[in-house]
Image (cartoon, rainbow, N blue to C red):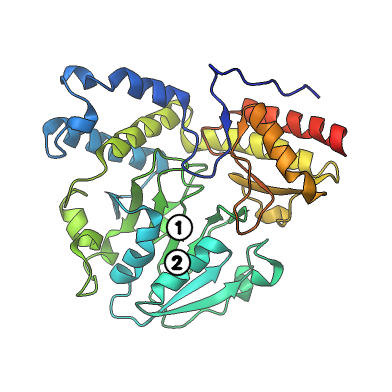
Amino acid sequence: MATAPRIKPSERIFNFGAGPATMPVEVLEKAKGELVNWHEAGMSVMEMSHRGKEFVAIAAEAEADLRKLAAIPASHKVLFLQGGATMQFSAVPMNLLRGGKRADFVNTGEWSKKAIAEAGKYCEARVVASSEDRNFTYVPKQSTWKRSPDAAYLHICSNETIGGVEYHWTPDTGEVPLVADMSSHILSRPLDVARYGLIYAGAQKNIGPAGLVVVIVREDLIGHALPDTPNVLDYRLQSDADSMLNTPPTFSLYLAGLTFKWLLERGGLAGIEQVNIRKAALLYGYLDSQDFYSNPVAKEDRSRMNVPFTLRDASLDAAFLAEAEARGLSQLKGHRSVGGMRASIYNAMPLEGVEALVAFMEEFRKKRG
């Protein structure tokens, strides 16, 4: 196995951070070239009026490209909003209860728990299945879910960024709208949007920089917001205003649009999925090949995007992180709630980054194991 190269000060690192995360270099270079003077407009996108013809065209093109990428049907609205996915923990019940008193949740980790706690301010947030019994290392089989007959919707976090647990299947919820927080794996694989009532995702992992959240919502589910819902959280008002009820995060939206084009140029979601499969297979294959490192997640539920792992001897964690950083393998420290290590290998992480990580891990194992 090759030795992981040492990073030079002038080079970009391999950023394994969970978010804000690495972005495609091609997107950054494109934005760099357009930063001061966008398309001879004489100004940067950051300086444009969100209601001017230039930015209105940028936003419209971004939506069209996202619709093409994810095959979003006409039945679903696309909103580009602020507040991140965390704001949607409140916005979803405010908009989707529609007179109901209860919503169902599957609890697969930290982000599920946060969504449950916030929804509990507006309704009975009922946990119909949980993987807490095994420290959130698997997705409960749907046959075990104890669903409510009168739930307004059913919510899942389809990829838990912290625990590295991913749904590789789409739940069948019948007439009950399925809601998914897809923040950390949206656009990493093909998606059947029609099976979801609502999808939301913070941008800072697979879409672009922080500051933007994408909401894809079935049109018949909007227009029923609770009376005291703030205007900026009312999906109907935002939809009617083309996501410009107030000033949107313009530069984040512009960069998201560039990322959508980057994905289209690489074969869309089917194309990027094949790259993601290769990256995940390489890293998990190595983790399973020895006993110095380990991954706790059930193999059928392992995330392709977020790979947590531990060292057999936790006293070596600090040395591992310091030596990895010196090699340009950055932000590998696991979330404070679970410890250990975590490699986030989103769409923009090249295969070479995963190869360099595996080479370093093997070198460290031989030296310290």
Q: Amino acid at mark 2?
A: Ala
Label ID, residue 115? 2
Q: Secondary structure at mark 1?
A: strand
Q: Residue at x 42, y 28 (%)?
A: 262
Relative image position of residue 118 (x, y in whole percent): 41, 70
Q: In the rendered view, tell whether residue 366 sits above or below residue 125.
A: above
From the viewer's side, name the closer residue of 195 and 306. Answer: 306
Foreground label between 1 and 2: 2
Label ID, residue 181? 1
Image quadrant containing the N terminus: top right
Q: Amino acid at mark 1?
A: Asp
Relative image position of residue 225 (x, y in whole percent): 24, 70
From the viewer's side, name the closer residue of 289 and 336. Answer: 336
Q: In the shown orientation, is residue 369 left or right of residue 23?
A: right
Label ID, residue 218? none
Relative image position of residue 128 (x, y in whole percent): 54, 77
Asked where in the image residue 5 lies, by quadrant, the reply is top right
